[in-house]
Every structure is written in C-alpha cells, then in structure tokens.
Image (cartoon, rainbow, N blue to C red):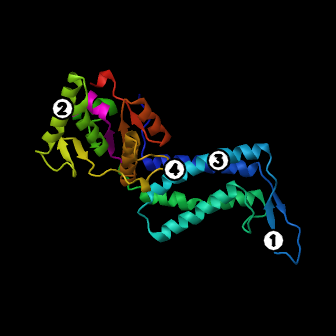
Amino acid sequence: MKQELSSFLTRLKQQLELIEKQMLELLDASSIKESRRDRYVFTPNYYWGEADEVQRRLQMKLNGAYSTWYEKFCLSISNATEEIKKEVEETHEFVTSWIEKKSSFGIPSTIREAKTEFKEKIQVFYELINMLDNGKKDLILVLDTNALIKVPEWSQYSKVVRQDKYTIIIPPTVLGQLDRLKVMHHDANLKEKVSSVIRRIKGLRQQGNLLQGVTVNKTVTVKMLAAEPNFKETLHWLDPSNEDDRIIASVLKVQCNFPTAIVVLVTSDINLQNKAEMANLPFLEPSEEDV
C-alpha cells in the first residue's frame, strides 16, 4: 500500500488550513445581532444569531476536526515554555468558543470583521508550526513485528520507500513480541525466522550503540527505543495495555521528537494500519516484491 508521505508538521499545517476554511464557511452561514441596550444590565453589544440546521451540521463537523487536530498539535509543543502553552490555551479557548458560538464580549459587529479576527487569532498556531520547522526532511521507518519477520534485511526497505537513505527504529513493544514468538509459538518455521531477526539485531550491537544508532550499508541507520511511551503524553484513546496502541504511541513519540521528518509505520497488520490511520500516521506495507 503506497501513500503520499509527508512530515508531521506538514500534515498539521494542511489540517489547520482546512479547519480555517471550514470555520470561514460557518461564519458565512452565521449572523451577528446587536443587543438591545439596557443601562441597568451589563451585556455584550453583539451576539451570534440563532443557528439553523446548516450551521449546526457545520459546527458538528468542525468541532470533531478541530478537537482531533488540537490534541495532535499539543503533542508537538509538549516541550514548549509555560508562556507559549498559555498563549496556545487562550487561542484554543477562543476557537472552541466561536465554533460553539458562546456568548461573550469579544463578538465583533459584522461577519466580515469576525472572519478577519479569526484569521488573526489562529496565526499563533501557524507561527508555532513554522517555528518547529528546521527544514530537515529525514525519512524514519518504525517497523512492527510482522514487517521485521517479512523483511529482515535492513537495506530491503529501500524497495518499500523507493529511496536508499533512511533510519529504522524498532520500538520496545516489538522487541518483546519477538522474544515471546521465539519461545512460545508452535510453528517451528516461524520461530526460526524470529530467531534469525533477533540474531541480526544482536549482531548490530557489535557495531555500535543501538540507542544512538548503528549505520549499515552506508546509508541506513538502525536504532532501538529504550523505553515504552508515556501514555500521559499521547492521544487519549490509546490503551497502554494494548500492544498495537503502544506501538502507535511509540511512533507518535518519534514523530514529535522529529517533527519535520517523514515518520512512517511499516506494517502488514490491518488492525495496526487502521489505528495508524486514526492517529493520522502514514504507514506502508511491504509487498512480496519487496522481500
């Protein structure tokens, strides 16, 4: 399965542009009313007009897209200063308030002014995405267990990605699965394949530090992740007791550590592919031609 591959930051920016477009569509379908003045009651000068069915559909679509995007965006700025995080939170509150059309004193007098203000407010998001972009577009492949068994030769992944220079990362969950398969699986042929993969990995330790990365075939670097992901710092729907979810969380962590890199999960597992798609992670599947 071949996909158009892009970096985490590129996808975040593209999705933000779509959210901006959808918000402007919602504003075009909306109205702003002037409040009746009462000198004894302190109320906003303007308020959103009542939402019709068209607006409510747009709100539901936009609310889902934005909440999903914002959770992933927050992963990318997990190391930001408290000042930046505060500015992001304030912008987030503004966006959600306008999607839900909550009453406030910040509502402008016209839809045209509202569209201009929304564009200005979300520049905070665009600026942070641009700030994180260091221009490096390295290719990182995170391999799952079945990919390693199917394609055990590191250089063969050049056929999967159609280029020769890349970094391979193996998560700790995958190493644990390999150890269990070597000992517990009833299929002798599979156990031998798994043992061969483990021997290849151990052989790399003779060449250097796998946590820092070992270069093989001159253009391929192989690395191991030392620790399982922290589930307090990942997508809320991932379950730490589920091995597929731990692999997805590991890929997300790699992605956030290298936001400008193209980070790709390599797997033939349909369930893992589905979860990768839900997490907005690119994935590739090695075919028989790649073996």
| Mark 2 neighbour class, 10 Å CA radius: few under 14, some 14 to 19, many 20 or more | some
The type of residue carrying mark 4 is: Lys
In-front residue for pair 31/242: 242
Q: Foreground: 73 or 17?
A: 73
* Quarter of the rendering occupied by the N terminus: top left
Amino acid of disc 1: Thr
Asked whether 128 falls inside the magenta stretch, the response is no
Residue 195 numbered tag: 2
- Measuring from the top left, give residue 189's x and y in whole percent: 21, 22
Judge from the rendering whether residue 247 lies leftward or rightward of residue 280; answer left or right: left
Q: Which residues are magenta?
A: 137-153
Give the quarter of the image for residue 61: top right
Q: Earlier in the sequence, mark 3 or mark 2?
A: 3
Q: CA distance from mark 1 to mark 3?
A: 28 Å
Report the residue marked by disc 4. Answer: 13
Q: Which one is closest to the eye, mark 1 or mark 2?
A: 2
Location of mark 1 (residue): 43
Are there few (<14), some (14-19), or many (20+) residues within 10 Å of tag 4? Answer: some
Q: Residues within 10 Å of mark 3 (few under 14, many from 20)?
A: many
* In contact (CB < 8 Å): disc 1 and disc 2: no
Q: In x, y percent, where is residue 50?
A: 82, 53
Residue 39 picture quarter: bottom right
Camera-side mark, 2 or 4? 2
For mark 4, give the secondary structure: helix
Q: CA distance from mark 2 to mark 4?
A: 43 Å
Element marked by disc 3: helix
Residue type beneath disc 3: Leu
